[in-house]
Image (cartoon, helix red, strand yellow):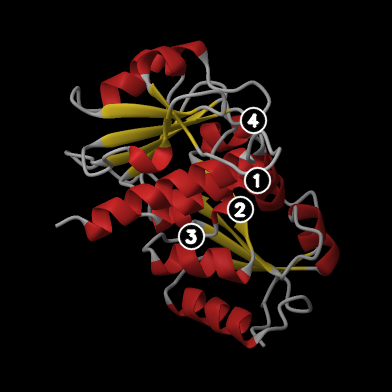
Amino acid sequence: MNEPIDLITSQENPRIKAARKLHTRKGRIAAGALLVEGVRLLSDAWRSGIRPEIVFYAPEMLGSDEGNALLASLQEAGCACFGCAPAVFAALAETVTPQGIAAVLPLPALPMPPQPTLILILDGIGDPGNAGTLIRSAEAAGADAVIVGPGTVDPFNDKVVRAGMGAHFRLPLRRCAGWNDVTALLPAEMAWYVADAHGGAAYDTVDWRQPSAIVVGSEAHGPSPHASGRSTGILIPMAGSTESLNAAIAGSVILFEAARWRRTAV
């Protein structure tokens, strides 16, 4: 057990108050940082080369061997680590069952590749779980980057980051306030495809070997007019009376079809 020399016992501690502000988009943008919780997420960030600005831990709550090994590694590397009373850590945490370790990290800012060949664009995705799952699937399918388009939840929202399962630390992400900004990030020759349950070519008939951008729109409202106007519609044929899939599932299916084409291309 890594016993702290000085224990933070007050929720009014300046470090705790500053960290709690990172639960809001405004706070994250102002600080250029985010707060991550849990052994798995923090381990992923650490292995990805992201050095925490500050680490908080609660000795009584950090019970796993993995958690204690992670804390020891961070301490040995000279990271600023502060022990907290359980009540203080619980006030800092957003998860229902905190694992006893959290850290303030600089917002990831991986560079965009100069010649991307597969990009995911999130178009008005408001559900944090869907957004995080799509970012996770994009990394797993070998996408070069994710562009967070207008109307989409903040990609560094706590729930989005948890659903991303570490992909945020390994995959370039770009937030764009307008569609002109989105277009400026992509090569002019890149083909755009938008998932559209109401019509278009079947997703498995597209030649995914060409540079492609996959646009996934809001489950409630569908793709935005700009995305629809700029993109070729594609659909996932379905049996039975099912009309559409969850946005994260639909986007993941298309991403992995693109990955299959690329993997089997001669």
What whole-number distance in Å separates the C-alpha atoms at marks 4 and 2? 17 Å
**Residue placed most toward the observer, 87 or 168:** 168
What whole-number distance in Å separates the C-alpha atoms at marks 1 and 3? 25 Å
What whole-number distance in Å separates the C-alpha atoms at marks 2 and 3? 20 Å
Q: For mark 4, does the 10 Å Cα neighbourhood hold few (<14), some (14 to 19), or many (20 or more) residues?
A: some
The residue to which callout 2 is attached is: 163
In the picture, which quadrant includes the N terminus? bottom right
- Is residue 22 at all visible to an observer of this figure? no
Q: Judge left or right: residue 164 versus residue 119.
A: right
The residue to which callout 1 is attached is: 129
For marks 2 and 3 on the same chain, the one whose residue lies earlier in the sequence: 3
Res. 37 mark = none
For marks 4 and 1 on the same chain, the one whose residue lies earlier in the sequence: 1
What is the x, y in percent for residue 182?
Answer: 36, 23
For marks 2 and 1 on the same chain, the one whose residue lies earlier in the sequence: 1
Q: Tell me which amino acid carries mark 1.
A: Gly
In the picture, which quadrant includes the C terminus? bottom left
The nearer-to-camera label among 4 and 3 is 4
Tell me which residue sits at (49%, 74%) in the image: 74
- Tell me whether the residue at label 2 lies in contact with that at label 1, contact meaning CB atoms closer than 8 angstroms: yes
The residue to which callout 4 is attached is: 219
Q: Tell me which amino acid carries mark 4.
A: Glu
Q: Secondary structure at mark 4?
A: loop
**Residue placed most toward the observer, 100 or 181:** 181
Tell me which residue sits at (54%, 78%) in the image: 70
